[in-house]
Amino acid sequence: MNLRTRKMKGNAMIILVALAFVIIMIPLMSMLYMIAIRGIGAISLEFLTSLPTPPGEPGGGVGNAIQGSLMLVATASAISIPISIMAAVYISEYRGKLSSAIELITDVLSGTPSIVAGVFIYVLIIPRTGFSALAGSLALSVLMIPTVTIASYESLKAVPNHIREAAIALGVPKWKTSLFVVLRSAMIGIGTGVILGIARISGETAPLLFTALGNMYWNEGLLQPTSALPLLIYNYATSPYRSWQAQAWGAAFILLVIVLLLNIGVRIVARKR
Amino acid sequence: MEKFRLVTAAFAISLAALALALFTQLLTSSLPAVERFGLTFLFDTIWDPVMEVFGALPFVYGTLVTSLIALLIAVPLSIGAAVFLTQYVPTRTSYLLSFLIEIIAAIPSVVIGLWGIFVLIPFMRDPLGTFLVECLGFIPLFQGPVFGPSIMTGAIILAIMIIPIITSITKDAINTTPELQREGLVALGSTRWEVITKIILPYARPGIIGGVMLGLGRAVGETMAITMVIGNTPSIPASLLAPGDTLASVIANQFSEATSAIHTSALIELGLILFVITVVINICARLILRREVARE
């Protein structure tokens, strides 16, 4: 092949790989456009603050779903974050056979399909306690714990060894070094992981289907079934009613804005440091 | 021994306990179905809750076929995009464009499903499905009639969802290619494309394979979006344009309205099968990627 055909082939390939990128962008742009157009139209103060109405009746909103989502995500975070950080400290600071085994197990757990987490919590507690927000939070925790643990031990491992050595040389006991020196240096990375974990579980639906179940009314505590934004989107989107379908777009808009703000915010903070 | 070490070890071990509990709970709860149907469960093609006949094959088929087609669509696009972003675009622009791809990964599955119902399904019905039937209809896989919700629709949704992870890992793998080798080939008079095909892609191949495996794991376990577009029909259709069902989608769809204890147990056994498949895929992916890290 002479140089000209080789160069032409190279140029053709540039077009092909650029095209691959453009093709990937098409569904993304279509999603963002549709959610913005149909979503914003559905949103009003009433939509954000009131209870759902039966199909056909005008008005109604997703207030209880927002409340339920906040409750589920807060509870799941309260359960997951301490467990994840402590486990990550062990994996990163006490290297050995046990910690590498647990590291592998955590990796594998992080691939657990979300629906399997729901089935697991269902068989574990639902027949005894009935559907509840707490069960939903536990199912979300099954997904959140591995993600946050991995993010945490990766940031802990990235802390340079000389920082640990300096602390130990000053006579600081190992536990204090881990807790107040290493953990503190890794705080940004761990925080990023926590926020991304929160963003992920905010959008999870499958684990809630048969744990939190859904509810048409305001939530009255952790031991009652509760609605949540993703559950509501699923139920409304697959319903035959036009008014509900329109509201599904509104709820999707709210959910997407929350998730994207968390994702983008984290990047900006992490990048500035 | 240090108390602190014991405390953190207890938390770490709780993760192992969680994994163990997951497996044993699914196993014990699916025992009724296992005892009643035995191995035929895996090969029976009939799933009839009313007659209490349960076979997993339509769902195993649906899961594997949608995931494989998703890979066929996603892998070339992801590798192309990764090459584009790492080789042809200035760093700053690349960072921005990569972020756009990562946004796809951040969109909740149920929101992608909503888009699937109201945008992708109508698109499948009219231009795309009809086009496939007209051009490729002589192949049984692309026989009409065209349904909106179908195995193909599910596969496209999965492809969209796994593109970000494959792209991102491919980019990482490409970036580990040694600079000297690239420069060497350029000095010998290679074009940029020749450097990519002769040095970069062969060098990045194990990493790319690991990324593809991770994408496969994601596709197999994906639930909401595919449940909303696949049509939820437990059968093994000859055509990809007919509705189907996957392991995850049938659980999402039927679990809360299961008609009998044996129905619930059969669904849990499907969950167990799904869990085992994803664990195996993920372990393979991690082993490949870990060997990569060790090689560097």
Image (tube, helix red, strand yellow):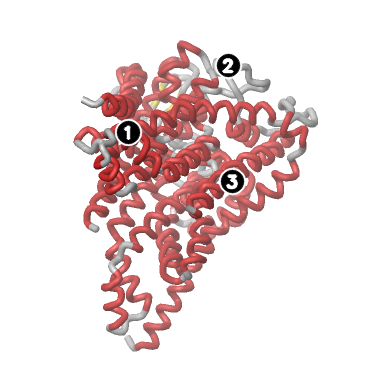
The quarter of the picture where the N terminus of chain A appears is: bottom left
Q: Answer whether labels 3 and 2 touch (C-beta < 8 Å).
A: no
Nearer the camera: disc 3 or disc 2: 3
Residue A193: % across, % down: 44, 42
Choose top left, top right, bottom left or bottom right for residue B4: top left
Which amino acid lies under the numbered mark 1 shown in the image of this protein? Lys
Label 1 belongs to which residue? Answer: A176
A245 or B3, which is in the foreground?
B3
Judge left or right: residue A150 versus residue A16: left
Nearer the camera: disc 2 or disc 1: 1
Label 2 belongs to which residue? Answer: A224
Judge left or right: residue A73 versus residue B217: right
Choose top left, top right, bottom left or bottom right for residue B188: bottom left
Crowdedness of circle 2 by 10 Å Cα count: few (<14), some, many (20+)? some
Q: Which chain carries label 2?
A: A
Secondary structure, mark 3, is: helix
Secondary structure, mark 1, is: helix
Nearer the camera: disc 3 or disc 1: 1
